[in-house]
Image (cartoon, helix red, strand yellow):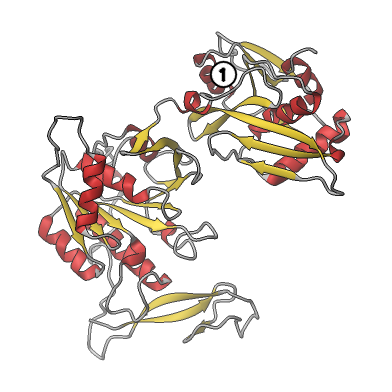
C-alpha cells in the first residue's frame, strides 16, 4: 500500500509547501495554508492504490439508467424525518454538527435505538465507553413504573477510533445504518497527523463516503463545531457528505433546532424542533404554540412575527424594550436578530417616524432561543420597539408580516398565505401585511388581512389606541 503523505497548499495562489507557514511566501497571504493528503508515487512497474467508488466504470446512456425514487428507511422520529426529507436514504452520508454538549450524541442515540427496532444499527463511539452509552440508553428508555425495559436486539455498540478496525467491524456485522461519534476522534494509522486534524478528518470522511456509496449503508457522522461556528476547521466535510444538519440552541433554553443547510435528497433550510428533557430529546409537534405559551398579552413591547423555517411557518414572540440612556452612544442589544438589521430598523424609526431613539437604549429579544435571519420579521421588530417607546400594546390577536425599507415603506415577502394559515390555526384574527400592488392569489380565509403601504400605516393598524 502506498504511503499517504501531507502537504500544505495556499488557498489564495495554490503554492504547495512541505511544511506549514503562517504566511504564504508566494502571495504574502496570512493563514491561507491548508493541509492536504497526497499519495506517494508507486514504485516502477507498480500499481497506484488510488481509490474510487468501484474501481470499474463505463459511460452509460441516460435513458438506460433507472430513475425510480429510492425507498427510504422509515425514521420513527417525525421531526428528524422531516428535516431529512421523509426518511433515511440508503447509501447516504449525513453530517450532524453542533456545539459540544448541545445534545448531538443524545439525539443520535435515540435515532439509533428507534431504527434498531427494524434494521441492524452499529453505533461507533470514540468518546464514550460502551458502559456509558448503555447507561444513557437506559435513561432514554426508562419505562413507566412496573414495566420492563425494552432494548432493541439489533443495536450494536463498539468503542473504536482506528478507521481500519471500524471498517472491519462494519464488514463483519453488515448493518444498514452506522453512526460515527465523532469524526474528530477517528484516525488512519498511515497518516502521521493526529486525530482531529484536517487531513485525518477529510480522509476519514472520504473513506466513509466510499463505503456508503458502494455498499448502500447509511452513515451518520457527528462533528463538533468550533468557536468560529465551523466543523473541524474549514468546511471540508460539508463538500464530502450528502446532507449537513446543525443542532442549534441556547444552552439556557430547553428548545433545540435541527436545521438542514445542505440536503441532496430533500429541501434545505428545513427545521425540526425538539425540547431537551430528562429522558432526552422530545419532539415539539406544534412549535408555534410552544414559543407563545408564556406570552403576556396586551403588554407594551411584544409583537408576533411569522417566520419561515424551510417550508414550515413559525409564530414567535418578538420583545422590544427602550430605556433612557446616559451614554453618548446608546446601546443596541439584539438577541435572536441580526445587529445590522436592528440598526437599520431603529434608523428608519428615528428618521421616518420621528421616534426619539437617539436617547434610548434598545433591546430586542426573540423568545425561545430562535434566531430569525429573514427580513419578514422587520415589521414585528419595529412594532415591538415602537410599542415600548410609546407604551402602547400591540393588538393581542394580530400578527405582523413584512420587510421594512429605508424609506419607511413595507415590502412584500414570500409565502404570505402559508404564514396566514398558520396564524389562523393558532387563533389569531388579524394580520398586518404589505399592500399588494399586483393582483395575486386570494388571501387566506379565516383571518382579517390589514394592508399597509408604509411603516406608519402599519403601526397605526397594529398598536392599540391610547
Q: In the image as oriented, which residue stretches furthest toward the bottom?
A: 44
- Give the image location of residue 151, x and y in percent: 14, 41
Check the image and report above or below for 125 versus 343: below
Residue 85 visible, this orientation: no
Quadrant hosting residue 294? top right
The C terminus: image quadrant: top right
Q: Secondary structure at mark 1?
A: helix
- The residue located at (46%, 87%) in the rendering is 18
The one of 270 and 300 positioned closer to us in this rendering: 300
Classed neighbour count for the residue bearing mark 1: other residues with Cα under 10 Å, few (<14), some (14–19), many (≥20) = many
Whether 255 is drawn above or below 233: the answer is above
Residue 444 position in % (x across, y down): 56, 13
Q: Is residue 353 left or right of residue 310?
A: right
| Residue 164: % across, % down | 21, 70
Considering every residue shown, the one lying at the far front of the view is 145
Instruction: Count the numbered circles shown.
Output: 1
Rendered residue at 22%/57% (across/down): 214
Q: Quadrant of the N terminus?
A: bottom left
In which image quadrant can residue 149 be found? top left
The answer to which of 429 and 255 lies nearer the viewer is 255
| Residue drawn at the location 81% of the way across and 45% of the way down | 330
* Residue 137 visible in the snapshot: yes
Q: Is residue 297 above or below residue 113?
A: above
Vertical position of residue 12 compared to residue 125: above or below: below
**86 left or right of 230 in image:** left
Location of residue 390 by image quarter: top right
Which residue lies under the disc numbered 1?
420
Find residue 119 and report its horizontal and vertical position in percent: 16, 43
Amino acid at each position: 500500500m502506498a504511503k499517504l503523505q501531507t502537504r500544505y497548499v495556499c488557498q489564495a495562489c495554490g503554492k504547495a509547501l512541505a511544511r506549514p507557514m503562517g504566511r504564504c511566501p508566494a502571495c504574502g497571504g496570512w493563514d491561507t495554508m491548508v493541509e492536504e493528503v497526497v499519495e506517494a508515487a508507486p514504485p516502477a512497474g507498480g500499481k497506484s492504490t488510488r481509490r474510487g467508488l468501484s474501481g470499474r466504470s463505463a459511460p452509460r446512456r441516460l435513458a438506460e439508467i433507472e430513475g425510480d425514487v429510492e425507498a427510504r428507511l422509515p425514521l420513527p422520529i417525525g421531526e428528524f424525518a422531516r428535516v431529512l426529507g421523509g426518511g433515511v436514504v440508503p447509501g447516504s452520508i449525513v453530517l450532524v454538527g453542533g456545539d459540544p454538549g448541545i445534545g448531538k450524541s443524545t439525539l443520535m442515540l435515540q435515532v439509533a435505538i428507534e431504527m434498531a427496532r427494524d434494521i441492524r444499527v452499529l453505533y461507533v463511539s470514540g468518546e464514550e465507553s460502551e458502559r456509558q452509552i448503555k447507561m444513557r440508553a437506559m435513561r432514554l428508555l426508562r419505562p413507566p413504573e412496573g414495566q420492563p425495559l425494552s432494548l432493541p436486539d439489533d443495536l450494536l455498540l463498539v468503542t473504536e477510533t482506528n478507521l481500519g478496525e471500524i471498517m472491519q467491524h462494519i464488514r463483519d456485522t453488515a448493518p444498514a445504518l452506522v453512526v460515527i461519534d465523532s469524526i474528530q476522534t477517528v484516525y488512519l494509522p498511515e497518516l502521521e497527523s493526529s486525530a482531529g486534524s484536517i487531513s485525518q478528518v477529510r480522509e476519514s470522511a472520504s473513506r466513509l463516503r466510499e463505503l456508503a456509496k458502494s455498499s448502500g449503508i447509511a452513515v451518520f457522522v457527528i462533528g463538533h463545531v468550533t468557536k468560529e461556528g465551523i466543523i473541524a476547521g474549514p468546511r471540508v466535510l460539508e463538500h464530502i457528505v450528502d446532507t449537513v444538519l446543525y443542532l442549534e440552541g441556547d444552552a439556557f433554553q430547553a428548545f433545540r433546532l435541527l436545521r438542514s443547510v445542505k440536503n441532496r435528497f430533500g429541501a434545505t433550510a428545513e427545521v425540526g424542533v425538539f425540547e431537551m428533557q430528562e429522558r432526552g430529546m422530545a419532539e415539539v409537534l406544534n412549535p408555534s404554540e410552544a414559543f407563545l405559551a408564556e406570552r403576556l398579552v396586551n403588554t407594551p413591547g411584544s409583537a408576533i412575527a411569522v417566520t419561515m423555517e424551510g417550508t414550515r411557518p413559525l409564530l414567535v414572540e418578538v420583545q422590544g424594550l427602550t430605556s433612557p440612556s446616559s451614554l453618548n452612544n446608546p446601546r443596541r442589544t439584539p438577541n435572536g436578530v441580526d445587529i445590522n438589521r436592528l440598526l437599520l430598523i431603529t434608523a428608519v424609526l428615528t428618521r421616518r417616524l420621528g421616534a426619539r431613539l437617539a436617547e434610548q437604549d434598545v433591546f430586542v429579544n426573540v423568545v425561545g432561543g430562535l434566531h430569525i435571519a429573514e427580513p419578514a420579521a422587520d415589521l414585528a421588530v419595529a412594532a415591538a420597539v415602537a410599542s415600548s417607546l410609546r407604551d402602547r400594546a400591540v393588538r393581542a390577536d394580530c400578527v405582523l408580516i413584512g420587510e421594512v425599507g429605508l424609506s419607511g415603506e413595507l415590502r412584500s415577502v414570500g409565502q404570505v398565505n402559508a404564514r396566514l394559515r398558520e396564524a389562523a390555526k393558532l387563533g389569531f384574527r388579524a394580520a398586518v401585511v404589505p399592500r399588494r400592488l399586483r393582483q395575486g392569489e386570494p388571501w387566506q380565509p379565516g383571518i382579517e388581512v390589514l394592508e399597509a403601504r408604509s411603516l406608519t400605516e402599519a403601526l397605526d393598524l397594529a398598536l392599540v389606541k391610547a
